[in-house]
Amino acid sequence: MKALLVNYEYCTGCHSCEVACRNELGLAAGEFGIKITEVGPYKYTEDLGLENNWEWVYVPVLTKACNLCEDRSKLGKLPSCVQACQAWCLYYGEAEDLVKKFDGKTRWSLFSK
Ligand code: SF4
Ligand code: SF4
């Protein structure tokens, strides 16, 4: 099963993936195939034993418009969003291969259809 893996620990919130996807799918302004959400900034009041008590991440979320770039995939090309991400936090491939990237140190999310 094809999937898209996100290491959102390193997402800078640059929105390049959103723009690349909108161009790929021909979406109107305000429509998204991938959308950057933001969590934080805030500091945890309880001592959670974390190295850094601040939470502030950008989390790319795939919407129902995403078709995992099926046309590009048939041509052996990477999805547009993956190609556009300069921070190397988007990966495309077989779900069973992608989960091997989980390192137990950074935060990941896996999307499929
Ligand atoms: S895989 Fe393709 S359709 Fe899906 S979010 Fe990325 S660019 Fe958009
Ligand atoms: S292009 Fe990469 S770094 Fe930029 S918002 Fe998208 S996922 Fe995050």
Image (cartoon, rainbow, N blue to C red):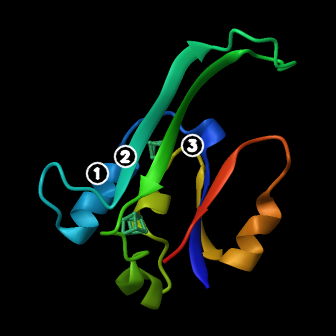
Residue at figure coordinates x 62%, y 38% from the top left: 10
Residue sitting nearer the eye, 19 or 60? 60
Q: Residue 49 at what x, y percent from top left?
A: 87, 18
Judging by the rendered image, the residue that carries numbered circle 2 is 16
User: Helix, strand or loop at disc 1?
Assistant: helix
* Type of amino acid at the residue the image marks with label 2: Ser
In the displayed structure, 10 sits above or below 88; it is: above
**What is the three-letter code of the residue carrying label 3?**
Ala
Is the CB atom of the residue marked by disc 2 within 8 angstroms of ligand 2's nearest atom?
Answer: yes
Q: Which amino acid does label 1 sit on?
A: Val
Q: Which residue is drawn at 50% across and 85% down?
A: 76
Q: Which residue is outermost to the front?
A: 46
Q: Which of 4 and 73 is in front in this view?
A: 4
Q: Which mark is residue 19?
A: 1
Q: Is residue 10 left or right of residue 77?
A: right
Q: Mark 3 points at which residue?
A: 87
Which of the 4 quarters of the picture holds residue 63?
bottom left
Residue 64, x across and y down, in percent: 34, 68
